[in-house]
Amino acid sequence: MDTSPIIISMKTAIVAIVFTFILGLFAARWILYRKSEAAKIFWDGIFTMPLVLPPTVAGFFLLVFFGSYGPVGKLFEDYLGIKIAFSWGATILAAVVMSFPLMYRSARGALEQIDDDLIFAARTLGMSERCIFFKVMIPNALPGIISGGVLAFARGLGEFGATAMIAGNIPGRTRTLPLAVYSEVAAGNMDAAYQYVLVIVVICFAIVAAMNIYLIMEKKKQEA
């Protein structure tokens, strides 16, 4: 079995979750501080869109913007000499975009459940909004935030449609585990496909199990 898809997928998921975690968390905070309900509805729709769009459609938009003839892709190629489309970086881009809504919505839900009295008390004590966010809001919303990060990581690991559109299916370069499964099935190599599927199932199960163990431990701490 070629192990390059496993290595590429893990590297992509690990790098992507760093961006997804930070962007999703701060997007959730930014939305909470919007006073206009219309603005909240609009931006929440934009942030959640990749979750409801077919992955190939999301990948199409990425290709339009980040392809060699797209506004962002052309800018990177002309001024930085970096080609985004059909590169390993494109697999990260696809994973971030498609997993971002899970992180954002989980973080927002966790932050919204914080008791307002805690925030008001912190403001009364003279704490800045930034200090309140890092020292009051994040610690109290941590289980929900961590859960969102775990789900986002699993989503990035299993991304297929958008990755195929913007990164392609290049062996040893952009072929991730889902693309490897598709390629092996298309070629009639069912034994190899079964092996890749087994790897994905084991990794995803381990991720979900780890998340559940963490939540159970947090619940016991709160009850103690």
Image (tube, helix red, strand yellow):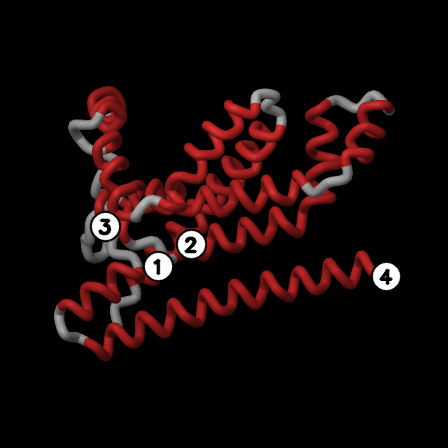
Q: Secondary structure at mark 4?
A: loop
Q: Which residue is mark 3?
A: 164
Q: Which residue is mark 2?
A: 155
Instruction: Please name the amino acid that badge 2 sits on.
Output: Arg
**What's the distance in space between the residues labelled 1 and 2, CA to CA?**
16 Å
- The reply to whether the C-beta atoms of the residues labelled 4 and 1 are less than 8 Å apart is no
| Residue depicted at 44% across the width and 34% down the height | 45
Q: Which residue is mark 4?
A: 224
**What's the distance in space between the residues labelled 3 and 1, CA to CA?**
17 Å
- The reply to whether the C-beta atoms of the residues labelled 2 and 4 are less than 8 Å apart is no
Residue 7: image tag: 1
Earlier along the polypeptide chain: callout 2 or callout 4?
2
Q: Position of residue 140 (x, y in %)?
A: 73, 44
Q: Quadrant of the C terminus?
A: bottom right
Q: Position of residue 67 (x, y in %)?
A: 20, 33
Q: Secondary structure at mark 1?
A: helix
**Vertical arrangement, residue 9 with respect to residue 185, above or below:** above
